[in-house]
Image (cartoon, helix red, strand yellow):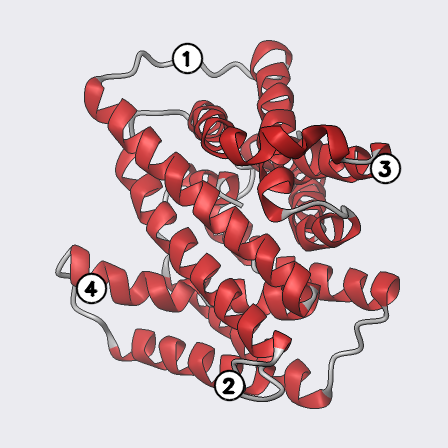
Amino acid sequence: MTPRTALGALHIGALMFGLTGVFGKLAAASPAIIVFGRAVFAVVALAFFVRFASNTRWQRLAAVDVRRLLLSGLLLAGHWVSFFISVKVAGVAIATLGFASFPAFTVILEGLIFRERIRANEIVLVALVSVGLVLVTPEFDLASGATTGLLWSVLSGLLFSLLSLTNRASSARIPPVQAALCQNLVVGLCLLPAAAPHLSEVRAIDWLWIGLLGVFCTGVAHSLFVASLAVIKARTAAVVFALEPVYGITMAWLLFNENPSLRMLFGGALIIVAIVVSSRLSGGSSRKVVAAEAASH
């Protein structure tokens, strides 16, 4: 893979991640069923990638690895469920931008958990995200679907941040594809009790959207990121990954006529700038860390 094709693969992967909310809205099923189906299809896609397109060796898991994968699988399930609840309640644009608050949570949590000093530029990052979220919300009313949906998406961002920190702790030992496959297995098992009684009610067209969500927005997108990281710098990959909200909001505008107001666009721009700045500041992040974060969404 050349640098040009790797960069193209990164953008295609970011586009597929951005379509997550779109397919979630197209599927007329509950968030529990969507997440269960996504996990099942993702496991199949990732297993195919491991078998035929990856040279990564499967690592033997120690007890501590199993515990971390179980925890990360639970966090991934909560992250996805809360995100799709937000999509159903408030739409793709608000859900995507609310989730994009995760860099601010990461800065705060790293300071609390790892006792790392929060720098001045990271405080600015948190401030940008906070102001952006205020502008994204049309009105602060818990009876409003927009406000409720934004809160669900911010919860999704918080869970994603916790998941990213968990992935970083294990990324040195476990290959990203193996970790993603195991995490999706945990997600599927967690959601099975809630989804099983209603699986027969899901329409064929909804299984199509869920299948596309699992195969392309999870399995293929993550595989593209992993393959391109062999050529592209981790910092570049992180910045491209930050374009996910742009792709998601654009597709929601084209498909669902979700026309964002100027206030929402300005708030979204602040959040996206914060993500890019965060990516540039974490230029020392390893390729495995970036791939692990990509696998989580």
Q: Nearer the viewer, residue 197 or 96?
A: 197
Tag 4: amino acid = Gly
Read off the residue under disc 3: 205
Left or right placement of residue 255 versus residue 93 in this view: right
Tag 3: amino acid = Ile
Q: Secondary structure at mark 4?
A: helix
Quick one: quadrant of the N terminus?
A: top right
Disc on the earlier residue, 1 or 2? 1
On residue 134, the disc is 2
Q: 224 above or below 88?
A: above
On residue 58, the disc is 1
The 10 Å Cα crowd at callout 4, few under 14, some 14 to 19, many 20 or more, is some
- Whether residue 73 is visible here, answered yes or no, is yes
Q: Secondary structure at mark 2?
A: helix
Mark whose residue sits in front, 1 or 2 = 2
Image spot of residue 278 (x, y percent): 42, 65
Image spot of residue 265 (x, y percent): 67, 81
- Whether residue 100 is visible here, answered yes or no, is no
Residue located at (63% from left, 75% from top): 145
Tag 1: amino acid = Trp
Disc on the earlier residue, 3 or 1? 1
The 10 Å Cα crowd at callout 1, few under 14, some 14 to 19, many 20 or more, is few
On residue 111, the disc is 4
Q: Nearer the viewer, residue 182 or 225?
A: 182
